[in-house]
Image (spheres, grey):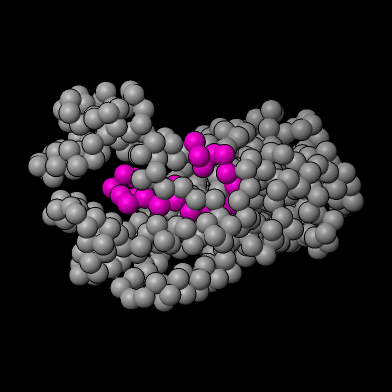
Amino acid sequence: MPELPEVETVVRLLRKRLVSARLLRSEWRVPSMVKGTIPFFKTTFESHSIHDVTRRGKYILIHFDHGWTLVSHLRMEGKYVEKNEANLPISKFAHVSFYFQDGRRFDYEDVRKFGTFEAVETSRCESLPSLRQLGPEPFDIHDRKAFYPRIQRSQRPIKSILLDQTIISGLGNIYVDETLFMACIHPLTPGSIVSDHQIDAILDHSQRILNDAIADGGTRIRSYASGEPIDGQFALKIQAYQRTGQPCSRCQHRIARITVGGRGTHFCPRCQHDPHYPYVIGITGSMASGKTTLLNQLASKGLATLSADAIVKKLYQKRTIQTELQRLVGHDVIKDKKVDSQKLLTWLIHDGHHVKKLEAWLHPLVLKQIDTWLQKHIGVVAIEIPLLFQSDADGYCDTIIAVESSQATLLDRLQKRYPMHDLEPYLLLNERNDWFKYRPFIDHVFENNGRLKDFLASIHQWYQDFITALPGQDSGGFQTTPVRK
Ligand SMILES: [Zn+2]
């Protein structure tokens, strides 16, 4: 479907080619496409000259010099085709032909016959029902304070609001996806929680995107054909629309596709945060690297926190889980109604497949608990997950941080933590956590080899920078105090 930039491109071409041209006669072959009768259209426009061609929303207004305007809408596939000579063959899809005094012919072609034509006195254009309902274009919204409530009084998703031509006109599916991507707003965000600041971003980005597209001649300019080659170049700059599965140009996360109000919708789940979930800091790293210290520091700053290890510990207390564990590992893994962690550890390191077996069963259970917990929270939260990437928990995280320590430091800490134990199994397990392979997806790595005081200071510094850069902070976006829904 042609969108505003394509229609504007057609209008500019028609203006260039048709102003001052005198219409000698016209043939209208499909009565259902004209609002009125064919004889009325013929007598109204024939023998008159075109004075200007303008646009309102996606309507093309062809103004004649005797004070009448032909209003044309291309709908799905309408197209103007310029013919240098009046007697060139007529396509079976040419439903209207305009013959001009200078010998040229313009055909209106439309495979599906959805296009429409209306005739109106130029002075009464704005009172035409189809034009009267149109909201302002992004370019025409000068009083923004008066415009904010038009969006904020709606509970509908922002994607649907922006597609509603009675609220704001000219933005179709492609440009709404592109605008929301640039403004970092999730397409499902209800209008009522979109801030003034975010609406400013929507208006600024949509104007720029539409202007760029108009300058480039539209995305897919199929709505005009003539001897002049016209190529829509804008397609090359598209960042979200129909880029499902490709990396986001800002953060490399995969572009996702959902359906909103029946329309295919493309967005970056990371840059365009879903307001129904909290903002999640994921923490990973080796055993004894200092992950828990980091988590506790964030808790002391007021964030709600969760630890995957704590979830596992709780799961291990459940009778059903213990039974399953016995089936997997052996009967004696449960002693006095408790999981014998030494037994489990020995079983785990005995065979590489054992780890995979346990994880394939345990990880989905842990993820389910994490999901339930996340749905109960808003604002910013932190989760510590040793196997964050390996368990696919990274999909929940907006920011991922890791803690790294040298092998010597890790050994030293483990010796202090488990003075009477054989450390070999722990070291082996630690080796299996190859989180550093995922380094390109980690936003910040803490080095923790020195004194605790330095580690705490580096956490504090990082947190200050993080809060400052948090999206939407300046508009009351994410809260950094724990809030339960
Ligand atoms: Zn992104």
Quick check: 133 above or below 283? above
Q: Position of residue 407 (x, y in %)?
A: 20, 67
- In magenta, the rendered stretch is 372-397
- Residue 247 is inside the magenta segment: no
Is any atom of residue 15 visible in this view?
Answer: no
Give the quarter of the image for residue 156.
Answer: top right
The outermost residue toward the left is 350
Quick check: 231 above or below 243? below
The quarter of the image holding the C terminus is: top right
At x 84% / y 47%, what residue is drawn? 125
Counting the numbered discs, the total is 0
Q: Position of residue 358 (x, y in %)?
A: 23, 36
At x 24% / y 30%, what residue is drawn? 335
Residue 147 falls left or right of residue 269? right
Residue 203 falls left or right of residue 395? right
At x 71% / y 55%, what residue is drawn? 195
Residue 30 falls left or right of residue 461? right
Q: Nearer the viewer, residue 400 or 80?
A: 400
Is any atom of residue 381 visible in this view?
Answer: yes
Q: Nearer the viewer, residue 52 or 196?
A: 196
Q: Nearer the viewer, residue 376 or 213?
A: 376
At x 64% / y 62%, what residue is drawn? 473
Residue 381 falls left or right of residue 361? right
Q: Position of residue 36 (x, y in %)?
A: 79, 31
